[in-house]
């Protein structure tokens, strides 16, 4: 029996959090490391120091003048787009293939999930 709920239980949470409130909390949790490291991009020292002792745009200048570093975001976005397009094609194709399995191979469906979010456990 599949029970639908509007609550999201986080691993460290004591009380359930409504799904509408869970998304901003999850985003804040995932962005926390970036908020800690971002000030280091404005530091003047060669080595990472948090918080920076002196503020500088040294690393931003290096990023904007070095061609190999300027190409890095473009390469990352290109790989992300290619990966997304591959997942959009391969994911539904694999799901259809697993849904149409017959005979002895039908047990393979239980290893990857039964469609109810329970995995192979029943």
Image: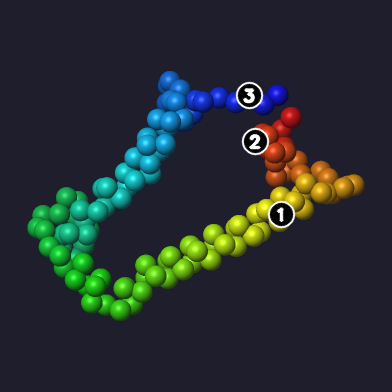
The first of marks 3 and 2 along the sequence is 3
**Mark closer to the observer (3, 2):** 3
Which of marks 3 and 1 precedes in the sequence? 3
Image point (72%, 38%), residue name: 114
Q: Give the CA separation, mark 2 to mark 1.
A: 17 Å
Residue hosting label 2: 117
Depicted 120 relative to depicted 75: above or below: above
Q: In the displayed orientation, state which residue is furthest to the left.
A: 54
Which residue corresponds to mark 1?
94
In the rendered structure, which disc, 2 or 1, sits on the residue that comes first in sequence? 1
At 38% from the left and 41% from the top, the residue drawn is 27
6 vs 107: above or below: above
The residue beneath circle 3 is 3
In terms of image quadrants, where is residue 58? Answer: bottom left
Say which element carries label 3: loop
In this rendering, position of residue 26 left or right of residue 112: left
Q: Are marks 1 and 3 in contact (CB under 8 Å)?
A: no
Q: Nearer the viewer, residue 73 or 33?
A: 73
Disc 1 from disc 3: Cα separation: 26 Å
x, y (%) of residue 65?
A: 23, 77
- Vertical order, 16 against 61 (above or below): above
Dot 1: element: helix
- Could you tell me residue 2's position as x and y percent? 67, 26
What colour scheme was applied to this rendering of the protein?
A: rainbow
């Amino acid at each position: 029996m599949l029970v639908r709920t509007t609550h999201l239980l986080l691993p460290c949470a004591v009380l359930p959090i409504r799904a509408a409130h869970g998304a901003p909390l999850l985003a804040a949790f995932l962005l926390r490391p970036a908020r800690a490291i971002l000030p280091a991009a404005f530091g003047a020292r060669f080595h990472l120091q948090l918080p920076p002792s002196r503020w500088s745009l040294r690393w931003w200048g290096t990023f904007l003048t070095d061609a190999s570093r300027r190409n890095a975001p473009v390469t990352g976005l290109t790989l992300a787009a290619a990966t997304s397009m591959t997942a959009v094609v391969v994911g539904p194709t694999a799901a259809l293939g697993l849904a149409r399995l017959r005979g002895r191979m039908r047990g393979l469906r239980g290893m990857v999930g039964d469609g109810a979010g329970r995995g192979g456990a029943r």
